Image: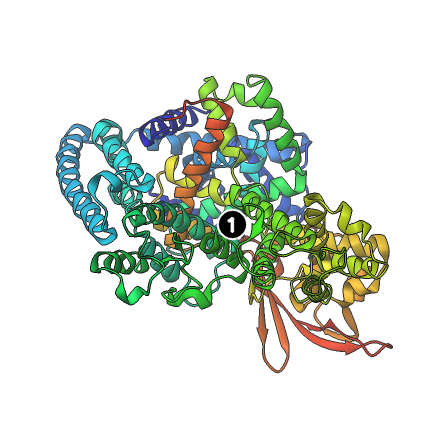
Amino acid sequence: MDEQQFDKRMALLKKSYDRIEPQLDPVDVVVQIEAEEVASTKEIVSLPQKNPNKWKNPTVWVASIASVLIVGVLATSYIIGPPTTVQTTEIEQSINYEEWLVDFTKKYEEKREEMRIELDMPEEEFNKLSTVQMASSSLNHLKSRKAEFLESQIINDDFTQSMEWSVMNYLMTPSEIFKMWEDSSVGKHLPFSDSFDYFKLYANTANEIASYYTSRLTDYSKILTTDSNHFPKELKHLISTANKQYIELQSDGQFRPNPLFGEHASSYKDNIHPDIVGYFKHLATGSLLVGGDLRLTASETAAILVMYEQTLLADSFTDSPEYMVLKGEYENTWLALLKGTESFSTHTLDGHITEEYKAFIMRVAEGEFGMVMQETAQTIVNELKTGKSLTLFQLTAYDVWMGVLKKRYNPETNTQYGATEVALDEYSIQLAQQIYNTYKQTGDMTVLNSLQPLNVVSLYIYALSQQDYKVAQQLVMDEVVGTEIPKFSDMLIFSDLSETKGATITIKATVKEEEQRIFGQSILFRIDTMTNDLGESQFRIAAIN
Amino acid sequence: MTEFELIEQAQQGDKEAYIELIRIHQRTVEKFAFQCGVHNCDLADVSQEVFVKLYRFLHQFKHDRFTTWLYKITLNATRDYYRKEQREQAKEELLSALQHIPSASAEKHVLNFEEDRLLHNAIQTLDEKYRYPLVLFYFHELKYEEIAEVLGISLSTVKVRILRAKEKLKEVLLEEGSVENG
């Protein structure tokens, strides 16, 4: 489906939306407002529900009829407006549009050529890049549908600027995408989902370019294993051009995008969300198995799997193609590592466990290579003491995935990553609900005692929204001081939680703008640690303001 | 009377002025709510909630862009609608059912063409972070800056999300077979 088809369908849908008949009777709004004003008491509890029998109230009838009459007068004055010079405007806009399109096409051609030269690609190859094709399709779309855009432009003078962006966004080199990512996150950590979008944007383009650069290596296959200082000038230029896009020539003779780990990594690498790193590592590494055997040593391979593990545990979009690929790689590589391969065998010829394998599985069991396979490795180690491990024999990719799932849904590992600000959206509410349900079902205090400060407040707010004061009380210290929070039934009255660490930890729950009249602008929670009878410390709310 | 004068009158408690304001903006609110996933039968209720909320803090309005403000409130009301009524699940079931019986929908009464209904439903399958910028860009013709303001995200994030939304939507449409590849 090209841009033209897509935009055409969206434009048609827009027209259909515009035909939808209004459904709300504005008088109903005023009736509800008046009913709430009357019902408003000294209580700080939320507003009453809409009264289905509102029309039985005679005062409502009088107010409504009066309102309708006045609206009729007002509406008439709106309808009988001064005539507009639509025709003149259209001609002017048409000329403006033509001029804009000529200017923009020139700008587009310049940028396209600039990108092609920067990537050092011949026109034929450059034109094959999907992002370049998308840009071209978008531009053609502008040319062929002038009338439609003209109509839009009359409504919105800045429409052309938006159109320029939508075309030019496709003409970004991988390094420019990284720069855009960096600019968008100045002074803050981008959430995982936004980081993933940038990753995908970068990876899509960089992968295609890296494939082209690899194709150019065929002429140099014999030289590649020699000292790079002796590479011919053309090859050095190719490598240097690739490096500017954070694409590196790797030891297996392939160019791969490697913006975080290589010699020429982006300076932005230290600010990238750590949960996205697994995707980048996979992008830079490619498959860890070749013909069923390990490409690297067992330790090197397992260390890379730790990075994949963090991403697999954190990414909530488990059905994305990127997630599925990483999951498959993770499962298959762990299976190969644990069951052994040709170069990394589990048993000697006389049937004994190899020393190399023993040492490796012990390190996995001790948690050196992540938490997902630790438990399985511990079982294998114990079983191998008897000479045979049934767990190892029966181990499948499904078991590896089950290990991931177990850790994904463990509330203890489900803490918000190093964030100082967390949006109270559907996801964080689900997380609070999950912790709440776990505690309610098990009554296990370790669920509450292992919570990080943000999760303590998030759960506290959730418990209040459920009117479960018993659970809420478990999260505050006995001597807690502060103001009473007005009753609310919806956690979504808050927009976000932000944590400030100083001598004490303070968490601010910001109230959404439209709810501030009832609940104030924000509620502050001071968090302290308290120690239980077993000498363990845990976070609790010490004050509320 | 200009919109600003109507707002001023409404701020002073003039209910008729407020009714007029509602009339000017109710189509925008209803369309946006519908495009965000509110079912046709609930549009009046959700829109009513929006305008009641708007009235509650109308006194805070100064010189901001009124429509941007309105979009924000509608967005929050739409989110609340999902959560309170637990509509997400019902929506998924509905969408799932629609894949097999595309015409058996309440939306049929709103969108007359099968192609429109398919596209509308495909948009509803997008994650909200992609759906909202896409809707505001294509159906409300908001500038990127305005979308950024409504959604509280950066300009570059808006651009990236619209790009990704388009990609995802095309994928959904291809999977459904409502368009041909190419």
Q: Dot 1: few (<14), some (14–19), or many (≥20) neighbours within 10 Å?
A: some
Task: Say which quadrant the C terminus of chain B sits in.
Answer: top left
In percent of width and height, residue A83 lies at 22, 29
- Is residue A8 found left or right of B120 in the rendered image? left
The location of residue A476, given as percent across then percent down, is: 76, 69
How many marks are shown on the rendered structure?
1
The vertical placement of A46 against A269, above or below, is: above
> Image point 74% across, 67% down: which residue?
A450
Does residue B44 appear to the left or right of B63 in the view shown?
Answer: right
Quadrant holding the N terminus of chain B: top left
Amino acid type, callout 1 = Ser
Q: Is residue A18 visible?
A: yes
Name the image quarter holding residue A459.
Answer: bottom right
User: Residue B54, how many percent across, how many down?
Assistant: 51, 47
Q: Is residue B20 visible?
A: no
Q: Is residue B1 above or below residue B177?
A: below
- The percent position of residue A415, horizontal first and vertical second, equals 65, 62
In the foreground, A61 or A217: A217
Residue displayed at 68% across by 74% down: A527
Instruction: Tell me: residue A234, above or below residue B139.
Output: below
For the residue labelled by badge 1, is the local secondary structure a helix, a strand or a loop?
A: loop
- Side of B173 where A481 appears, left or right: right
